[in-house]
Amino acid sequence: MLRREFLELALASSLAPGLPAAAQSSTASQPTFPIVKGLTREVVDFILKTNYEDIPADVIELGKKSILDGIGLSLAGSVAASGHISREFIRNSNLCGGSSTVSGTAMKAPPRFAAFLNGVSIHAFDFDDTQLVVGPGRVYGVLMHPTVTALPPALAAGELAGVSGKELMLAYHVGVEVECKIALAISPRSYHFHITGICGPFGSAAAGIKLQKLNEVQSLNAFGVAATAGGGLRANFGTMTKPFQAGHAAEGGLVAVGLAALGWTASHTVLEDTGGFFNAYGGPFEFEPDFLTKQLGNPWVFASPGVSIKPFPCGSLTHPGMDEMLRLIHKYNITAQEVESVDVATNKIALQSLIHHDPHTGLQAKFSMEFCLAILLLERKAGLNQFTDAVVNRPDVQAMIHRIHYHGSSAAASAGLNTMNTIIHIHLKDGRTISGQAEYALGSPQHPMSYEQVADKFRGCAEYAHWPKDKSEKIIDAVHTLESMSDIRQLTSLLSMEKA
């Protein structure tokens, strides 16, 4: 059975504790688990040998946009409920104090806990960048959120060591590259997990390995620990536990590096072993080792397939439809009062992530196609201030949600599961129907944001956190010229309150 033939079966069933009969009867034709000797060592070798000069200039510039985006979201997320609760947990555990800045606060913490807290904040609103799959055997939108698990550990460990901007970017890019290529290599069976949660520790560990200058044996041990440090279930989407899963992954890699530096041991074949990462998370189905044996840094993931920066603070599966809805609203000057109903279709697999059809919280709304289109019809915008419990439960919003009918369709799936082909029909009360279709949104590699557009998004996030405008503009300028910074504490100081 080919990957694409297996895909809908794998995603439509639980695959645990056993396969359905149809799947069981077909497993005999499955390829055997690939035996790739030395795979973990090859990945570690890439981490250890890559220098800043090996990263193409265009990749550096693309990375700056994601770094700025991540920093802005760490500020915005610091005022989220999950930010307050996670910091209170650290305080109650007597874990405050240390060298690393917790963005948007006066708190300092040891690097591992700063990475956790900032990771939770970056992912709090589901507004952070996304590595969107493009392969024909994969499903759009189910891979990594790369920056949330690579940037917080790089900043936290880098601040402790007082590294330069170039050293920070090297660690960040190596982390993103490794975690994303592992996510691309893994079997679609793993989509039942939160990919950021299970692959993110490798990115965190890779960044930590570069900054703490581990040797080969230590690095192999760190990878062995990182493989067991993650976790994440899709059932937690739409709750505070989704950002916890990302923050936990960001922390887990640094813990792995710290233990390995002291002599902790682990498997040196943790990726390729039949009892290791790929087989455990991917099950008895194949993974694609070429992403690691041939494509690490060749090309860099920022160059191809690219990383998307989100225009809206919600699940990326909604974005093509939202972008198209907004275009239609403006083109035809559609008002909410004119709308009788809306019919929206995507491939059926998207329904397994956009699970909240009757949302009543801001977190649920992030995984609700119905809310995302409803709020655009009502307010012509969908920013951080729209995804709140109060807005979701407004009578006009609830009424509009129930006039939007979202379903899977073969017509939408015809473009392939690796696109988010979204078909919209807006039925107006005067009898007209206005239709549109889109596969990609602003911020995608096919329609990228400029640095200034990302800076505008950053300003909105900073304003949401009531961050001083002068500091915000200094952060924008600092990231734009990050390669010239001699000590990244010049940057992290701009993320800290002067007093509690």
Image (tube, rainbow, N blue to C red):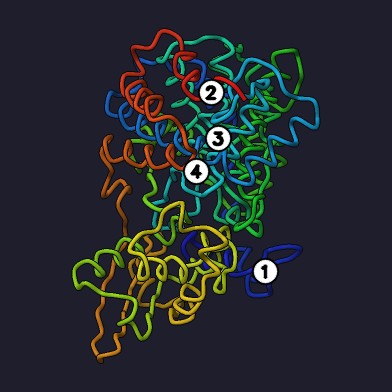
Residue 222 place in picture, x, y as percent: 67, 23
Say which amino acid is labelled 3: Thr
Q: Residue 145 — which label? A: 4
Mark 3 or mark 1, which is nearer the start of the sequence? 1
Say which amino acid is labelled 2: Ser
* Residue 38 seen anywhere in this rendered image of the structure: no
Q: Which residue is mark 1?
A: 24
Say which amino acid is labelled 1: Gln
* Residue 129 seen anywhere in this rendered image of the structure: yes
Badge 2: few (under 14), some or many (20 or more) residues near its Cα, within 10 Å? Answer: many
Quadrant (top left, top right, bottom left, bottom right) of the C terminus = top right
Q: Nearer the viewer, mark 1 or mark 2?
A: 2
Q: Please give left or right for residue 460 compared with residue 231 in the image.
A: left
Q: Which residue is mark 2?
A: 496
Q: Nearer the viewer, mark 1 or mark 3?
A: 3
Whether pointer 3 and pointer 2 mark residues with C-beta atoms closer than 8 Å, the reply is no
Q: Find numbered disc 1 in the image and state the secondary structure of the residue it sits on.
A: helix
Residue 237 place in picture, x, y as percent: 60, 57
Say which amino acid is labelled 4: His
